[in-house]
Image: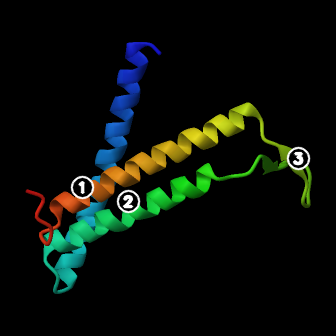
Amino acid sequence: MRPDVLVAAGRRFLVLLAGISAVVVVAGLVLAALGTASPDRTISLGFYGVGSFLVIGGFLLGNRGPYRGSSESFGRSLRRATPEDSRESINMAVLLSVLGLLLVAIGAIIDSRLELI
């Protein structure tokens, strides 16, 4: 792959990671203001929850079978997945899994109950 394509993909990945992280932090701060838990605890739990959800979603998406539903007809007709369908499914599964694992790692870094060093 060309370096400019990899740089653009890395930039999009970091924007996606930053956007999800910002939403998790804001939601954690709102929940901390409403409840009795500390902000670092609610934020770390948010990262754990969203990260775990993405990892599970990536796992389930990566385990799709070789058949897809046909959109041309009504009812329960199936068609064989094209190579493009399979490639897209695997790429999305890897993306969700890596994002989820990074979010869980960020949650572990933020969590005040864990001592990493």
Give the labeled residue for mark 3: 72
Classify residue 69 as left or right of residue 75.
left
Residue 6: image location, x then y, percent: 40, 22
**Foreground disc of the pair 2, 3:** 2
Q: Which residue is drawn at 36% across and 68% down?
A: 49
Give the labeled residue for mark 2: 51
- Asked if the residues shown at circle 1 and circle 2 are in contact, with their CB atoms under 8 angstroms apart, the answer is yes
Q: Which amino acid does label 1 sit on?
A: Ile
Residue 101: image location, x then y, percent: 36, 53
Residues under labels 2 and 3: Cα distance?
35 Å
Classify residue 102 as left or right of residue 65.
left
Q: Which amino acid does label 2 sit on?
A: Gly
Give the labeled residue for mark 1: 106
The quadrant in which residue 8 appears is: top left
Residue 30: image location, x then y, percent: 23, 73
Q: Which amino acid does label 3 sit on?
A: Glu
Q: Which residue is drawn at 74% across and 51% down?
A: 65
Quadrant position of the C terminus in the picture: bottom left
Q: Residues within 10 Å of mark 3 (few under 14, many from 20)?
A: few
Q: Which mark is residue 13?
A: none
Q: Which residue is drawn at 50% across and 43% down?
A: 94
